[in-house]
Amino acid sequence: MNKLYVISLLALLVSCKTQFGLVHTVQSPDGSSVVVQNLGDIIVTVEPFTTDTWSRIAKSSQFIDRSKTGRLPKIPFFLILIENKSTQPLRVKEIAIIYSGMRLPVLTKDELKNYLSSPAYEFIKSEELCTPLRLLTYSGKIQNINFALDVVPFTLPFIPPKDIHCAIVAGKWIPVNEQKFTVEIVLQFPDNEKIVDCTFIRQEYRTKGTHFIKPKLEEH
């Protein structure tokens, strides 16, 4: 990777981290950074974007213009991996974010491209970021995907049998008082539908000061 690009990327990510020891986390109820739902013939993995996720994405010039810089978007992004081990094609009918009785579909491709049209995000190649991807190889761990080598664009409206696909989606801003939310994925087969729910807990705490101790995840 180009040395100047590495320096620019590190500066970008550091500038986007919360200062003064304030830490934000988005984890599964058991404390994992991802949620994996195994339905037997279908495995769905959802990873909320962190600065680490952006760093991995940025290693591929397919998604990031290395000649530009800016700041990371504040809306929630998710990396969603779907392994179709069945003998039937499937389609992702809808993805939504649910909290406190609200159910909000993720941003459409046009909505996300419009949001990323701000000069602050011009280093992000929005068209490529919105395009679904087919994995050529997969180690079994979403964090190990090499976006420069392991994926190719895939624009057919379904996931063929035995294929593994991933997509990057974004939702609208979630109010700060909402600690718990669910990413709902509706999968459609030729003869039925399956709904996959991936629940996350948001935490915010300080690492400095006697009155700020990392809280335990609430029981839900």
Image (spheres, rainbow, N blue to C red):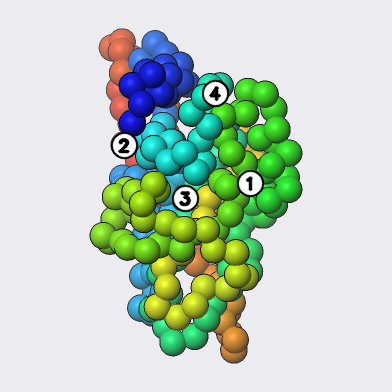
First along the sequence among labels 1 and 3:
3
User: How far apart are labels 1 and 2 at the CA level?
Assistant: 39 Å
Residue at 69% over, 42% down? 113
The disc label shown at residue 216, or none: 2
Image coordinates for residue 23, horizontal then vertical, percent = 38, 24
Instruction: Name the residue that disc number 1 marks.
Output: 127
User: How far apart are labels 4 and 1 at the CA level?
Assistant: 16 Å
Q: Nearer the viewer, mark 1 or mark 3?
A: 1
Image coordinates for residue 216, horizontal then vertical, percent = 31, 36
Which amino acid does the dot numbered 2 rest on?
A: Lys
Q: Eyeballing the image, is 35 above or below 213?
A: below
User: How far apart are labels 2 and 3 at the CA level?
Assistant: 25 Å
Along the horizontal axis of the image, is 191 left or right of 3? right
Q: Nearer the viewer, mark 2 or mark 4?
A: 4
| Quarter of the figure with the N terminus | top left
Helix or strand or loop: what does disc 2 sit on?
Answer: loop
> Mark 2 and 4 residues: CB-CB less than 8 Å, in contact?
no
The disc label shown at residue 79, or none: 3
Which amino acid does the dot numbered 4 rest on?
A: Lys
The disc label shown at residue 68, or none: 4
> Mark 2 and 3 residues: CB-CB less than 8 Å, in contact?
no
Q: Nearer the viewer, mark 3 or mark 4?
A: 4
